[in-house]
Image (spheres, coloured by chain):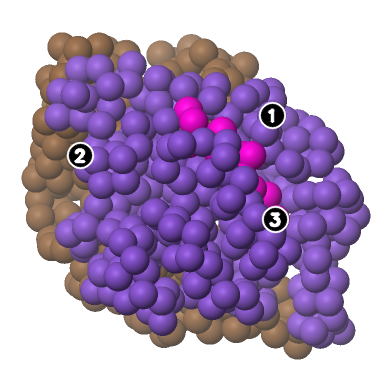
Chain colours: A purple, B brown
Amino acid sequence: MIKSVICERLGIEKPLFQGGMAWIADARLAAAVSNAGGLGLISSILGGPEAVRAEIRKAKKLTDKPFGVNVMLADPNAAAVADLVVEEGVGVVTTGAGSPAPYMERWKAAGIRVIPVVASVAYALKMQELGATAVIAEGAESGGHIGDTHTLALLPQILDAVEIPVLAAGGVFDGRSAAAMLLMGACGVQVGTRFLVADECRVHETYKERLIKASDVGTMVTGKSLGDAVRSLKTPFTKKFARMEADPAVTPEEIRVFGTGSLRKAVFDGDLAGGSFLAGEVAGLITRKESAADIVNDIIGGAERLLAGAPHLIV
Amino acid sequence: MIKSVICERLGIEKPLFQGGMAWIADARLAAAVSNAGGLGLISSILGGPEAVRAEIRKAKKLTDKPFGVNVMLADPNAAAVADLVVEEGVGVVTTGAGSPAPYMERWKAAGIRVIPVVASVAYALKMQELGATAVIAEGAESGGHIGDTHTLALLPQILDAVEIPVLAAGGVFDGRSAAAMLLMGACGVQVGTRFLVADECRVHETYKERLIKASDVGTMVTGKSLGDAVRSLKTPFTKKFARMEADPAVTPEEIRVFGTGSLRKAVFDGDLAGGSFLAGEVAGLITRKESAADIVNDIIGGAERLLAGAPHLIV
């Protein structure tokens, strides 16, 4: 079986994290992934700190395996969530959209493993210096908020720069991409988009159907003019967003207002005109709905078959 | 040693193509790559069809190994180059920036192996239908003109769609990324950016120095507003180009005029204010100048070490 340093450090069976997607990654999805041997993650963006606490407590009932919380640091509730992960005894925290510096000492004192998502070498080095257990090198193939560099180019540059373990995210879908990342030196992978069609995933049926229909050129990036690039499915909403960005008569403030609440409209309402259906470039590879366990086993089982002859990765 | 179907079909030793970069890929570089066991490629954009013919004849003197010509189909000289590759008995043609349909019958009758560069599943299928020997799936990490999807997501989608062999390009730099692509199912890789710092590469010393200095976020994409996205190093030129694109007072025609001849200004003059230093995201991995043979051997040797236990890839 594939084992890596991240399995040992976190006490997980398989080196696979499920992305802690805002408004999406709840106890049900995270527990299903953890029960399948990966690391499930609950998002800090679920409607306020007490909603997050409730999901953490629910996950503890659904699984006795390790799971984590993804703390979105730009969120006004970040400090409150930073406290409650300590209070609730969460073992692993991943972070995004900002620096975890204000919380690192407290988290480390509580024995929490902190694993920031990073999109550049400079940020990876900064996180290593702060005492991160590992980093997740996330290429801009991924869905949601993205950086500038893509996984195949980003991962080796971060691997060369830091000494802590590095996981790969962005463009990881099945045994092929997972095996490729492990072969290149990643200690594990994080998968987001594929879990959107998991049976245990709460997104609206329209969201799942659109992912299944998406082609290899089915996503686009908007928000660059606002300094906030986001990858999502091509929909009436994203096309209108892009037209507003290209129109000099439209102000950034008007665009922001148009985008406010759009992820919730996609997740809960399947609203194609007003919703932002965040998705990575691998959406084109999605062909069906399946259980979270089947997704975990397909990815890791496929990677194990491809790496069967690479004894340094298989124990 | 790593062998794949593309080695057998083309009579090459190593499954590595050197990108046929416009104004750059000449006889000297192509022959050096072919002599090292890869497939060197001469660009069709070197200053007119007779310049291309002269480079082909020069390459025949510099190597007795197979080499090819990359035909840039959007170029007004494409038809003339399409004729002369037949007249000169070139064995392999790669194509980009358009459809090779008008030339396919003639090339195939002449025994030429045609291997188009493709950036989408739809185009890969079209090329298979036209009788291409293989396709090169090129992700948007690469330098120069790019599509929308990146290699780690694009390659498996094209592999799943076509039956002909698929090479991977975009983000391939060393043994790690080459091994990753082969493990995922590619029959070979194409490398462009790294060969820019080859001793045998004609680009200006400033171009090489800038590549060595580039970081993981050292490239940017311009030209999207013109429907012609291009990746290059961040320089005063590209930043000005991006500002012009964002300025509603500047017309597309003015931007095109600003960009005309910019690649030559980078290649021959090292002109940072007026030159377009095309480069892929792997520029950040470049640390030194070296010979083309050292580059080929580092990539393939490194891939062989990583894949040492994968018997289906090593013979």
Question: Are marks 3 and 2 in one subunit?
Answer: no
Q: Residue A23, labelled with which disc? A: 3
Q: Residue A77, image x and y in percent?
A: 62, 75
Mark number displayed over residue A199: 1
Residue at image x 28%, y 74%?
A130
Relative placement, left or right, of B120 versus B151 is: right
Q: Pick whichever, B83 or B242, lies toward us.
A: B242
Have a look at marks 3 and 1 and say if they share a chain.
Answer: yes
What is the C-alpha distance between the residues marked 3 and 2? 39 Å
Does residue B272 lie above or below B47 as drawn? below
Give the image quarter of residue A179. Answer: top left
Tell me: A73 left or right of B88: right
What element does badge 2 sit on?
Answer: helix
Chain letter for the residue marked with disc 3 in the picture: A
Residue B171 at least partly seen = no
Figure quadrant of the N terminus of chain A:
top left
Range of magenta residues: A21-36
Camera-near label (2 vs 1) is: 1
Assess whether residue A31 is covered by the magenta stretch. yes
Q: Which residue is mark 2?
A: B175
- The 10 Å Cα crowd at callout 1, few under 14, some 14 to 19, many 20 or more, is some
Mark 3 or 1, nearer chain start: 3
Within the magenta stretch, is there residue A24? Answer: yes
SS class of the residue under badge 3?
loop
Q: Alpha-carbon distance for marks 3 and 1?
A: 16 Å
Q: Amino acid at mark 3?
A: Trp
